Image (cartoon, helix red, strand yellow):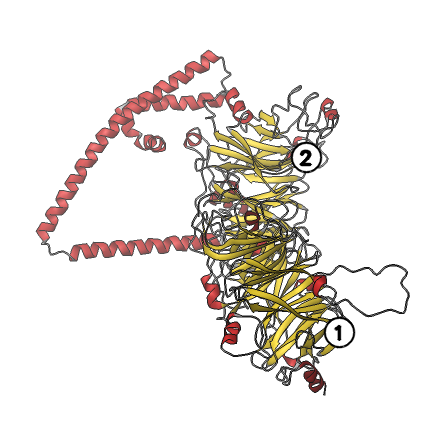
Amino acid sequence: MAHLLRGKQAGVQNDLSAGLGPDLFVIDDISRFGINSQISQIAYDPVQSLLAVGTNDTQFGSGQIYIFGQRRINVILPLPRRASVKVLQFCADKILCLDSKNDLSVFSLETKKLLASYSPPAKITALHSDPTLDYALLGTQNGEILAYDLDRESLAPFKIPNFWKEQNPRARGSPIVTLSFHPRDIGTLLIGYSDGAVIYSFKQNKPVKFFQYQLPRGAPGGDSDPSAINIARTPALTQAIWHPTGTFILTGHEDSSLVFWDPKDGRVVMARTLQDTNVDKPGAGSTSLGSTPGTFAFKAPLFKISWCANQDPDDTGILVAGGAPTTLPTKGLTFFDLGRTPVYATSSWQILTNHFESPKRQRILPTPPNAEVIDFCLIPRSSPHFAGAYDPIAVLALLSSGEVITLSFPSGLPISPTNQLHFSMTFVHPFVTYAHLAPIERTRWLGMTERRAQGPLILKGGAEAKHPLKRFESRNIVQTAHADGTVRLWDAGHGDEVENDALLQIDITQAVGRQDDVNITQTSLAGATGELAVGLKSGEVVVFRWGHNKNAGKESPPPGPNAPRALTNISERRDPALIEGLLPFTMLDGQNGPVSALKLSDVGFVAVGFEGGSLVVIDLRGPAIIYNTAVQDFIKQDKRGSFRRNNGQNTVKPEWPTAIEFSVDYSSILLHVGTNLGHLATFKLLPDPSGRYTVQFAGSSSLDDRIIRIAPLSADTGRPAYASQTTVANLRDGIKVNGVLLAVTQSGTRLFKPASHKGAHKTWDEFLCDSAAIVRYEELGYALLGLYGDGYARAYSIPALKELGSVKVDSILDIRRFSEAIITNSGDILGWKGPSEMALINVFGTGQTLNQSNGALLNPELSIPARPTISNLQWISGTQYITPSDMDILIGGPDRPPSKRMIMQARADEQQRRAESRIAGSTSTSSATGQDEGYWAYMQRQLNERTEKLGIMGDSMDKLESNSAGWADEVGKFVRKQKKNLVMGGCEVKVWVLERYGMFDRLELEMRSKSSWEGHAEHFGRFLGLF
């Protein structure tokens, strides 16, 4: 009966929801977009070209690990227990995680599952691994170092005691803060305690050098407080890293001092801060002044230090996060370009000191204002060695706000994450401030492929998984607006195969002609025309149109002034890097408050509502403003009276548009405008003899609350009656639409014929409606679907407005942000799950759960490059070289069986040897049988070739003998010169130096005798091959 009554009131004779029932409403959890919580760690694997991101445990989500690859490859690894990710490292085919619950978790990149979880007996304060080892070193709070066997998934018997406590028994407690293998000698470990640093030798099984930074009285150090200068102190150590070749050591301290050490004798080469030098000497340095006279500025702590190497490891630079005075106007990363490292053996102490005192250049890599870089991750070109700082091309900086920025290295120019990083990373690059969704026809979206000048790709690893073929012809295109004035468009899909997975980027700051105060409040996308409208809080509306940038690669001219309350041609304000895409077209500066409602139709009209209470309609065929009026001019005043006498004057509440939609009726295009006070006005857009359109007011209706959705539909079929290109073209052919309007408010809904019919009405019983839309399930019918304040999604029939079914969704979506959720006509709901995470669900599902693994990560064909070794001069001088295989014996013991990686490597080497032998055998067989050559001719040819090779070898030996004699003379001269310098300089010659030069003396005598040369050919070949 309700169906007949409400249908008659609304003018809808058919039951448009006849095939729908409560059993159809089941949630499918399709996908997640963004990051669930605050980012705490970032790691990069240059071999597999993968990026890992760890998050903190917050109220919005537990800590977990995201691993991103190329395109849309994304794998989520949950932690064994609810905790925060504290340390994250790639190690060969594994990823290691140390969390806030003191658990070490080992995940496999191949299986994308947890391999092992270990809870050490002591609190872990440092984690270090090497891709060539099957062990992870765990530094503890009590100063000991444990070794965890990644292959056996258990603790190894190897343990390093607290050397600092042995050195200084009075030290109360010296926890380990950092661990670092020597970049060229894996048998040497740099241990950073809170009191100082120690170099430990695995081959000698003992510490070989101690380093402690001590400041005498009068030395400023890195302290900002001048009163601390008169106190002798020992600043605690926070960082300890190697020079890329191991020539020097750099330690960072809690007073923001950077101390360079000579690892051979333990002396301080230079102690400095970011601004001052020689801060360890009395009377040196200066105090950072505060913003007012008589005050001083605090310095930020040293968050992270990285000693970077160019393609030549001796060409280095130091990247520092933190350590700068808080009063500096420009904050960011500090980079010291040191240039080529002086040769230690031939450089004086003054040269070494000047190298760190006066860098080649010092620059600041700028970051957004009011944010501090607390961590960063370098992006090496190919090698995972040198502590991940070899030949980096970019750096990902983690800000104190939780956002991420990408900078080129070492120039520091910002890099857009669009199509460089996984699009989930764009949610924090910077934060998303607004999101909207619009369906676009599939073929149209496939043609919207942006072309933009771009650098080398950062993520190239992984292989995408197969997904079901397209479920719908329309694609869910999401528009996300970011805090830096950037808008990005991407296909959220329907849980199916995304054919065009590239992102589109629009720079609003370039279009409006300023960098500040660009806050986006509304977007509207017209997929049929390839146009986008963007509304700002400052009152501008910018329209973009798809096109080709003829001035690509050229800087745009300085922007001119924007015309107030009029249209401005902004076609010249194009992004120079954009070749083809959405280009600026026109802009309206409304100057009447923020944009509160915005709609761009598929037929070339834009309607804009401002919080100041005005409505503007733009015809893009000009473009021209064809209508501009105030809401109060066409909205009927509420005539409802009150029995209570009002002593004061009647106050008019401010009113502004909140919802705008275009539709078609029997003969014309209609514009519907809903307000925050529940008024709904209808306008007709009629063609004018001049060729343009005019806007005429048709009438208004009064509803009970803020209008959140206006949905036109056909009264005969239930199909949407939006003003599409097809429906408007049909009007010219006499094909008319019997349309009705469904207007949804927070407290109820009304189905009526525009403009002023009363129609059918329903009030929500207990909870307010935050978002609503008309949905369709296959061919069974249409329904009104809404999100309500009790956490449920409810569906109502049309036209009876009777509840069909409900499903609880607040376990997936954030109920506090239901009003920002978007419901599509296919039953998809895109809503916020957290501050930087969105979820896509479908109410017409089968109970599908979320798939957190999208694609394969590990490429077994990519091998880890060999670890750098000690230099030739170090090897000649007697330095013992320790290989990773030796380390397996030293740490795991001689009885440890070969690891899985060793077995696989041996098997691969054997297969490669067999394949090469088969190829060689087939080549020799084919060469012997494939030619029409007689036996005696074959023997003669072989004899001639061997004779020729013997002649070449004889000539080579003659040249080798003459070259070796000359080289021996040069060695003798060098040795005699060094001896003379030692005697003239009055240096104290130690026993080991005499032994080394004794070796050179014997070598010189041996090489001067031909017989001795022949007897020691192997010994000489060793030296000759090195030099």
Q: Quadrant of the N terminus?
A: bottom right
Q: Nearer the viewer, residue 844 or 988?
A: 844
Q: Amino acid at mark 1?
A: Trp
Q: Marks 2 and 1, how far apart in space?
A: 54 Å
Horizontal and vertical percent position of residue 190: 57, 36
Q: How many marks?
A: 2
Give the vertical position of 723 relative to 516 (above or below).
below
Outermost residue on the front side: it is 689
Q: What amino acid type is highlighted by mark number 2?
A: Thr
Residue 150 seen from this side: no
Q: Crowding near pointer 1: few (<14 within 10 Å), some, many (20+)? A: few
Residue for point 52% across, 29% down: 361
Q: Residues within 10 Å of mark 2 (few under 14, many from 20)?
A: some
Measuring 72% from the left and 62% from the top, which residue is drawn there?
Answer: 632
Question: Residue 459: x, y in percent?
Answer: 49, 52
Measured along the vertical axis of the image, is residue 947 above or below residue 451? above
Tell me which residue sits at (12%, 47%) in the image: 941
Dot 2 lies on which element? Answer: loop
Query: Which numbered disc covers residue 326?
Result: 2
Question: Mark 1 — residue?
Answer: 764
Q: Compared with residue 358, is residue 158 higher up or lower down, i.e. above or below?
A: below
Q: Is 802 left or right of 731, judged from the image as shown?
A: right
Quadrant hosting residue 944: top left
Tell whether 8 sits left or right of 907.
right
Considering the image in quadrants, where does the C terminus appear? top left
Position of residue 506 measured from the top left corner of the image (x, y, whole percent): 53, 53
Element marked by disc 1 = loop
